[in-house]
Amino acid sequence: MPALNAYLVVAALVFAIGLFGVLTRRNAVGILLGIELMLNAVNINLVAFARLHGDPVGLLFALFTIAITVAEVAVGLAVVIVIFRVRRTIDADRLDLLRG
Amino acid sequence: MDRALAVLALPFASFLLLALVPPLRRRGVLAGWVGILAMAVAFVQALLLWRSGVQGTEILPWLPGDGGPMATVGLLVDGLSAPMLVLVTLVSLLVQVYSLAYLDDEPPRSLGRYYVYQSLFAFSMLGLVLSPTYLQMFVFWELVGLCSYLLIGFWYTRPAAARAAVKAFWTTKLGDLGFVAGIVMLWANTGTFEFEALFRMAKDQTLPLEGFTTIMFLIYLGAVGKSAQFPLHVWLPDAMEGPTPVSALIHAATMVTAGVFLVARSEPLLVLVPTVLTVVARVGAFTAFLAATMACVESDIKRVLAYSTVSQLGYMMAAAGAGATDAGFFHLLTHGVFKALLFLGAGAVIHAVGTNDIFRMGGLWRAMPHTGLVFVIGTLALAGVWPLAGFFSKEAVLAGVVAGGRPGVFVLLAVTALLTAFYMFRVIFLTFFGHGHPHGEHHPHDPPWLMRAPLWLLAGLTIGIGLRFVIGGAGEHHPPAWLTALSLALAAAGIALAWGMYGARVVPVELVRRPLAIIDVFARRRYFLDAIYVGIYRGLMLGFSRVVGWIDRYIVDGILNVLSAWSLRAGDALRRIQSGQPQDYVYGVAFGVLLLLVWAQWWRSP
């Protein structure tokens, strides 16, 4: 199954790019975008394996994840907006209220 | 035996009734009458029991054990406990009647509480007397100690009373420690607490004698504490902080004689260990003498009587130690009657005058002839004047000591007899004769009949017992004629000296005091025993506490402090890795997952 490997490599790349974004972006919106990429990498995996096993549950699960992701983004952006209103910044380096 | 059970159960029923029914207790006087009624019936029962001459034992199993009960309880009525029952119920009854008038200023609640304690005390004392086993005796022994504590501290708002109660409790507890150790060791050696079984063993010479001296000495220690023998006598004078009727009942007639009763009860065992008997006799005689000297310089009327009680208890112990246990017990009974009389008389005087100091009394004979007369009767009995009860019992004690071949003890007791007559008549002359002192608003007069009746009854008994012996002969004791002459002469000399010094005042007090200056100084300071005890307490106990406190503060607490300081410092160091940046945490998680993956791969590969 060379096709599966190709999907998996793509998924791994997307996941790594997303993680890189989450870790290096200083902008909160950028971090959210990174998270989106990581979730979509997972979706690719789900669909690829569903195809491999001929099992529609994987597809359903991917749809489900997309729906959840939408909600997550909506909440995440709302949080970012509130943070911006309170702190007048969305720079992640300056959001360090939990520093010990 | 039913009568014995009734005697024991009645005060207990009265105690339960008063303790568990608060409305009754709070009525005060009514509670008093309940207690008195129970005691009166118990007294009649005890008297009938004694007159019927029934003897016997009733034993029930108590603590179960392998092969028969480990401990038993029951009732023992014999020649020792039957007369003691009569004495205890009689004095309890009279004291309860007397208290009703003596404590008439008390609020009803306090009076009710007083009668609860009184009933409990009567029950405990009767239980002690009726005990057929050492263990049961010990239980009741502690109960009377508790009642003594409660009644000394009856006026618990007075600091002196509270202190005296605690002192009495702890001092007697010191002796009780020996007592309980002794009976446990005795049980370990013989496997029984029962008197009858032990006496049978002693008779058949099957008693294991190894370590028996130690055991009997430990048991005797209990008697030392309870009967206020030297060196544990210090609590009794302080116990006078309690109400006077309590002093009459507990600290003169009944509870303090429990020690003597214990020694008398243990006589068949004690005769096997002459060493302990010698100790009993010598300590008794020494206590008698020491307390008598302190009584001679005391100015508080109740304390004089307290020292006199200590002294007379020493007499009884000396007799028991010299092998004349029956003489000692006889003295216990007569002393119980006339010392209760003296205390109740002193109570009447204090009630009338409002002070305890004999130097601030005087000339009371005219104001209170009844009290004066009964007090003189009691004093004559205590001094050992023919034909009163005290004469015969004191005679019997002295004869017993002579027969026991203890000249040293005899000399001490003889000197004590002289001192006894002296200090008691010192009180008489200072209190009832001489010049009257202004008593402020108090106009001393004889007490009401509720108090007068017990006084006259006891006085009548004091004379009656004496006359009984005049008519019926002195029983089995036939003291030599020289002894009778000597003891009468000693009493007369003591009375004469007191008259000379305090009555007619022809002998200046200084003339007597100067040659005896050393004794005088020591006696006035109670032979520094209290100071020594306080010193021991401060030095040893507090020193030890200080060491323990240091260990606790610097070693036990120190270890914990070091541990907590380390935790704080470690936390402070670890605090710095919390940057507060979510990305750092995500980085940590990602790195950790990566590490796990690498590790899993590396693990699988070889």
Image: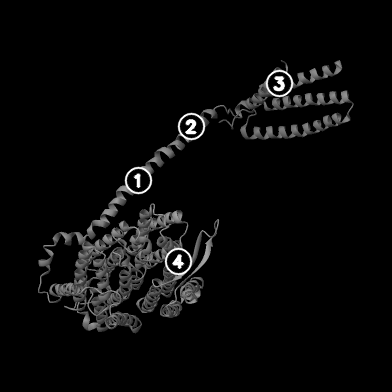
Nearer the camera: disc 4 or disc 3:
4
Nearer the camera: disc 4 or disc 1:
4
Q: Are marks 4 and 2 on the same chain?
A: yes
Residue B491 location in percent, x, y?
19, 73
Question: What residue sits 86% from the left and 26% below the top?
Answer: A50
Q: Tag 2: Cα neighbours inside 10 Å, few (<14), some, or many (≥20)?
A: few
Q: Is residue A13 above or below residue B224?
A: above
* Rendering quarter of residue B383: bottom left
Would you name the residue on which mark 4 appears? B132
Q: Secondary structure at mark 4?
A: loop
Q: Is residue B68 above or below residue B354?
A: above
Instruction: Give, as a three-letter code, the residue at label 4.
Output: Pro
Question: Which one is nearer the viewer's eye here, B129 or B378?
Answer: B129
Compute the Cα span from label 4 to label 3. 83 Å
Q: Are marks 4 and 1 in contact (CB under 8 Å)?
A: no
Would you name the residue on which mark 1 appears? B544
Would you name the residue on which mark 3 appears? B600
Residue B166 location in percent, x, y?
36, 60
Q: Secondary structure at mark 2?
A: helix
Nearer the camera: disc 2 or disc 3:
3
Q: Are marks 4 and 3 on the same chain?
A: yes
* Rendering quarter of residue B408: bottom left
Question: Which one is nearer the viewer's eye here, B266 or B238?
Answer: B266
Compute the Cα span from label 4 to label 1. 41 Å
Q: Are marks 2 and 3 in contact (CB under 8 Å)?
A: no
Q: Tag 3: Cα neighbours inside 10 Å, few (<14), some, or many (≥20)?
A: few
Instruction: Give, as a three-letter code, the residue at label 3.
Output: Ala
Residue B596 location in percent, x, y?
68, 22
